[in-house]
């Protein structure tokens, strides 16, 4: 009830030590459609559910290539995501021009986090209303990061953000111990299984509303095309994580 | 106290030397070095063949026997450069960066024609401190036919069916005029197949290596088709 006394701008603390504007921005992320990421020793996979504003419209893309070795999946305000995407791409291009090598993933995520934090400490600005899952590969290994409107960032083995993401995270909690040694195909099937947990009863996964992006140590970022998606969704029917345990 | 300007200057300036005594400094440092070598490109229906020797020299010295003059910018086009190697590297870096940005903004790779124009504008942007580069841009056009664009150092360019640049230019282009166009040829057979043209290109480099001291070591050939890029390396004279 008293929230509205302290939530006008970013420069007002609440008595409980909260910045409500930042918390509200994180709500915008939770309203976005689900996207998740998971990694093994060799690969990172990003899966997202694309929303269609109406029957007449196209599906909103949720994954964007930043560089050959890095990509993001977004949840929240797409317009804000575009700004961060452009920033990340420019930083990678400049780094490549100067150092002739790929931008280290953690360092770029830090830059994005710094930029986001800046927006939470001014009377005239608002936080970015988008959360990013950043998948990347650099000499330090395979990475998956999450960034928040608050300016925090975390590294994950697997993570899901957006609407009904808790269902996907529950799936991950049960099976993430298998991911490290999974093949790329197993990883994709795990990702799609997790997304399947998060869709509504009357919805179904098909090659139009699902987006899968893959990255590997020797594999530049690519999206799976419509045919490949269809094949994987068909394989889902016969996929069970238990079979992977038996293999090992 | 007013002193006329002319009188004042007398105190500071020495008498200007007579015109006959002016000597030009001849050993001033120059930002330009010619790292030489020869590049050529031939466009045929369905493919384009780009070749460059791999010798890097400076004056009478060889700096490397294994330096590429070719740079693939997109799936469909290749930049081949003779002249100053440092400027080639700088130009290549600029184009790679700019073309990746183009791909992000337009969600599709730049066409060969677009790259050709971009290269021309970049060269002219340095009109008053030019890139010491003599470029050929070879690629596939919208119909997947081979096309070659030839440039001077400041960006003037034109579409051609074949082009040669570098220290062996005069030696090689005359041979190509004769073999590929049938100019001044008594027996006017024009090669039709890719293999025949490849043979002619290899012969051209061997001939250039014989007479031009800056051409030799290896010839690197890229064949660009809609299916992909093929790379061939053949040895040349090492002296």
Image: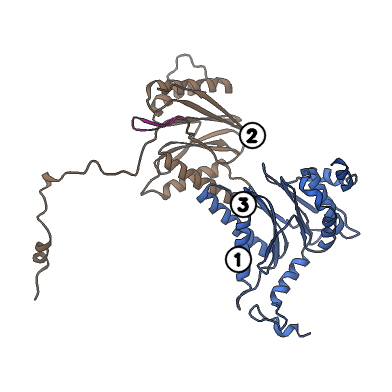
Could you tell me what secondary structure mostly forms the magenta stretch? Answer: strand
Q: Nearer the viewer, residue B8 or A42?
A: A42
| Neighbourhood count class around disc 3 (C-alpha, 10 Å): few under 14, some 14–19, many 20 upward | some
Q: Residue beneath label 1, please?
A: A114
- Does residue B116 appear left or right of residue B45 in this picture? left
Q: Which chain is brown?
A: B
Same chain shared by disc 2 and disc 1: no
Residue A51: x and y, percent? 79, 59
Q: Residue beneath label 2, please?
A: B226
Q: Which chain is blue?
A: A
Report if residue A68 is visible in the image: yes
Q: Nearer the viewer, residue B176 or A68?
A: A68
Residue B72: x and y, percent? 55, 38
- Nearest-to-viewer mark from 2 and 3: 3
- Does residue A126 appear left or right of residue B26 in this picture? right
Report if residue A240 is visible in the image: no
Furthest residue toward top: B187
Q: Secondary structure at mark 3?
A: helix
Q: Residue beneath label 3, please?
A: B104
**Earlier sequence position, callout 2 versus callout 3:** 3
Q: Nearer the viewer, residue B25 or A191?
A: A191
Q: Which mark is residue A7?
A: none
Spatial CA span between label 3 and label 1: 24 Å
The chain carrying label 1 is A
Q: Tell me the quarter of the picture where residue A117 sits.
A: bottom right
Determine whether B37 is above or below A32 in the image.
above
Asked if residue A17 lies in the magenta stretch, the reply is no
Spatial CA span between label 2 and label 3: 22 Å
| Neighbourhood count class around disc 2 (C-alpha, 10 Å): few under 14, some 14–19, many 20 upward | some
The chain carrying label 2 is B
Residue B37: x and y, percent? 42, 31
Residue range (magenta): B55-65
């Amino acid at each position: 009830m008293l929230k509205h006394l302290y939530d006008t701008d970013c420069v007002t603390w609440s008595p409980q030590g909260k910045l409500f504007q930042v918390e509200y921005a994180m709500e915008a992320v939770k309203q976005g459609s689900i996207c998740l990421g998971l990694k093994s020793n060799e690969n990172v996979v990003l899966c997202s559910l694309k929303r269609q504003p109406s029957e007449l419209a196209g599906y909103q893309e949720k994954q964007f290539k930043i560089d050959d070795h890095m990509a993001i999946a977004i949840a929240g305000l797409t317009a804000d995501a575009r700004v961060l995407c452009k920033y990340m791409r420019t930083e990678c291009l400049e780094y490549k021009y100067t150092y002739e090598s790929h931008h280290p993933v953690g360092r770029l995520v830090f830059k994005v986090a710094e930029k986001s934090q800046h927006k939470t400490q001014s009377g005239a600005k608002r936080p970015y209303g988008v959360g990013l899952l950043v998948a990347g590969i650099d000499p330090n290994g395979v990475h998956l990061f999450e960034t928040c409107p608050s300016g925090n960032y975390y590294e994950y083995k697997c993570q899901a953000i957006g609407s009904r993401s808790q269902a996907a995270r529950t799936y991950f909690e049960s099976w993430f111990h298998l991911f490290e040694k999974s093949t790329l195909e197993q990883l994709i099937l795990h990702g799609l299984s997790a997304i399947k947990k998060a869709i509504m009863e009357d919805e179904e996964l098909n090659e139009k509303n699902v987006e899968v992006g893959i990255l590997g140590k020797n594999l530049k970022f690519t999206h799976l095309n419509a045919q490949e998606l269809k094949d994987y969704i068909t394989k889902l029917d016969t996929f069970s994580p238990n079979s992977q345990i038996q293999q090992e | 106290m007013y002193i006329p300007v002319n009188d004042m200057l007398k105190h500071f300036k020495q008498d200007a030397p007579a015109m006959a005594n002016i000597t030009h400094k001849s050993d001033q440092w120059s930002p330009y070095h010619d790292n030489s070598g020869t590049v050529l490109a031939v466009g045929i229906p369905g493919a384009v063949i780009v070749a460059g020797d791999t010798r890097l020299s400076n004056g009478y010295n060889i700096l490397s026997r294994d330096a590429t003059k070719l740079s693939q910018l997109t799936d469909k086009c290749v930049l081949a450069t003779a002249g100053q190697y440092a400027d080639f590297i700088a130009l290549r870096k600029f184009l790679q960066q700019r073309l990746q940005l183009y791909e992000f903004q337009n969600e599709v790779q730049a066409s060969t024609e677009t790259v050709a124009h971009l290269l021309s504008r970049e060269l002219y942007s340095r009109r008053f401190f030019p890139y010491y580069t003599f470029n050929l841009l070879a690629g596939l056009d919208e119909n997947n036919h081979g096309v070659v664009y030839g440039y001077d150092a400041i960006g003037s360019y034109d579409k051609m069916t074949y082009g040669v640049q570098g220290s062996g230019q005069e030696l090689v282009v005359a041979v190509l005029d004769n073999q590929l166009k049938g100019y001044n040829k008594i027996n006017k057979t024009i090669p039709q197949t890719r293999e025949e043209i490849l043979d002619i290109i290899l012969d051209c480099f061997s001939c250039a290596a014989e007479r031009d001291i800056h051409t030799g070591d290896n010839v690197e050939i890229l064949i660009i088709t809609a299916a992909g890029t093929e790379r061939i390396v053949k040895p040349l004279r090492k002296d």
